[in-house]
Amino acid sequence: MATRAPRIHVAADFRVGGDVVLPEGAARHVARVLRLGSGAPLTLFDGAGREACAVLVEASRKQVVARVDAIEAGRGESPLAVHLGQAIAKGDRMDFAIQKAVELGVAAITPLYTAHGEVRLKGERAAKKLAHWQAVAASACEQCGRATLPPVHPPMGLADWLAGRDEALRLVLHPGTTGAFERSEAPGDAALLIGPEGGLAEEEVAAALAAGFAPLALGPRILRTETAPLVALSLLQHRFGDL
């Protein structure tokens, strides 16, 4: 059985017959980790919804170059566009939340500063962390077959994020009701707010409710902050999306 061509994210303008120079990280993965050489097939995607069938024409220490044979529209996008507001978690927990959210078809992610959150990022550390999270999202797209890379926005305060929400369905994880899934018409978009390990403060929940969010309970057990988006997104995609 033929093996599937590796999928690589390259933010480039694909042209049939044109050459694409892979960026450093992708080039290292292709040449040194996968140990692919000239003639090996690749699937490239631009993160904006296009895929390219390509073949390696150079895999040297200096550069890795692929030639585009064909271009097609990517697949794997959900009809439900969910914007995830995720309280920033420590270390691998945030990576896990972002990775699984991308696999479950999230349309955008905004890391949030909340009252009970323990992570505060500034300056160069914030820029490095954001680049890391964006790389996690790109890697998840490579794995799950999406050609559209959902943006991971710079972290912001919860109040600012709430002020920008106008999605048709807005949910905050909080002891409440599952009635949000009982609506007859599927919304075109949704916002999902997940608090930190210590939960949202009472005033933060009140602010979310005032911004049109409905409380959502996910069963009788308390879920970790990185588990909650996985469960909530699965339910949303099952009810209104493509699961």
Image (cartoon, rainbow, N blue to C red):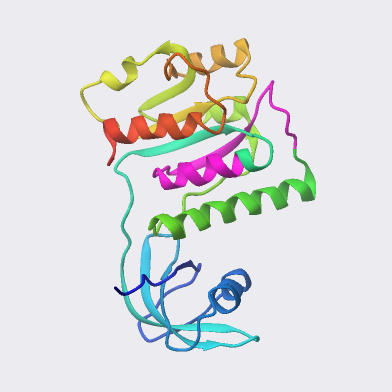
Observer-nearest of 144 and 106: 144
Q: Is residue 154 visible?
A: yes
User: Where residue 46 appears, x then y in whole percent?
Assistant: 44, 65
Residue, x 36% and y 70% (percent of image)?
4
Find residue 168 and report its image quarter. top left
Q: Is residue 165 visible?
A: no
Task: Reply above or below: 34 against 119.
Answer: below
User: Where residue 110 appears, x then y in whole percent?
Assistant: 56, 38
Q: Quadrant of the N terminus?
A: bottom left
Q: Is residue 237 left or right of residue 30?
A: left
Q: Is residue 155 left or right of residue 65?
A: right
Residue 197 is a magenta residue: no
Magenta stretch, residue numbers = 94-120
Q: Quadrant of the C terminus?
A: top left
Task: Reply above or below: 54 against 138.
Answer: below
Observer-nearest of 64 and 72: 64
Residue, x 63% and y 73% (percent of image)?
24
Residue, x 56% and y 42% (percent of image)?
96
Observer-nearest of 61 and 195: 61
Name of the residue lying farthest toward the front: 1
Find residue 206 and report its image quarter. top right
